[in-house]
Amino acid sequence: MAGVVLRAAVRSWRVGVQPGCGVRPLSQTQGPPGHPSFVESTDEYQFVERLLPPASIPEPPKHERYPTPSGWQPPRDPPPSLPYLVRRSRMHNIPVYKDITHGNRQMTVIRKVEGDIWVSGRVAPPGLARTS
């Protein structure tokens, strides 16, 4: 039985030709003659533009009081003279995150720290309390 299957496989085997890669009729490679495959229109592009992300992040709006109800406040201008600087994210937020691992280990992660990072680790910013 195995010999019959092997002979059939060897007989139909052709070197370098994949099945289904033979010559195709012209009707399978082209659409109907004189009929374009798509129509280009710029009238509806305004609907596409609404779905595209903006090229740049807009400046945050001015508020009457800070911090806002969500707790956001703009950066001080000029920044304080410290040996380190924490840059804001592109959405104008402070990059401070809470990282929970192994179910109960909680860490505060501060990203985008520039300058002397060791001083920034010893001196906790206001609002962050050290727990040992």
Image (cartoon, helix red, strand yellow):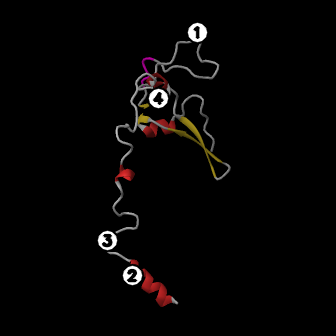
- Kindly report the distance in space between the C-alpha atoms of the residues bearing marks 1 and 4: 28 Å
Q: Of all residues shown, which one is farthest toward the right?
A: 104
Q: Confirm whether the magenta stretch covers residue 9.
A: no
* Residue at 44 percent of width and 35 percent of height: 113
Q: Amino acid at mark 2?
A: Arg
Of the numbered discs 1 and 3, the one sitting upstream in the chain is: 3
- In the image, taking residue 124 as reference, residue 55 lies left or right, namely left
Q: Would you name the residue on which mark 4 appears?
A: 53
Residue neighbourhood size for the residue with mark 1, other residues' Cα within 10 Å, grouped as few (<14), some (14–19), many (≥20): few
Res. 40 in view: yes
| Residue count near mark 3 (Cα–Cα under 10 Å), binned few <14, some 14–19, many ≥20 | few
Q: Please report the bounds of the magenta region as a residue range.
A: 77-81
Q: Is residue 14 above or below residue 26?
A: below
Q: Could you say where residue 110 lies in the image, as x and y percent from the top left?
A: 51, 37
Evaluate if marks 1 and 4 touch, with contact meaning CB atoms under 8 Å apart. Answer: no
Q: CA distance from mark 1 to mark 2?
A: 84 Å
Dominant secondary structure (helix, strand or loop) of the stretch shown in magenta: loop
Q: Mark 1 against mark 2, which lies toward the viewer?
A: 2
Query: Which residue is labeled 3 in the image?
Result: 16
Front in this rendered view, residue 115 or 71:
71
In which quadrant will I find the C terminus?
Answer: top right
Residue 27 image point, x, y percent: 38, 51
Of callouts 3 and 2, which one flags the residue occurring earlier in the amino acid sequence? 2
- Residue 11 — which label? 2
Q: Nearer the viewer, mark 1 or mark 4?
A: 4
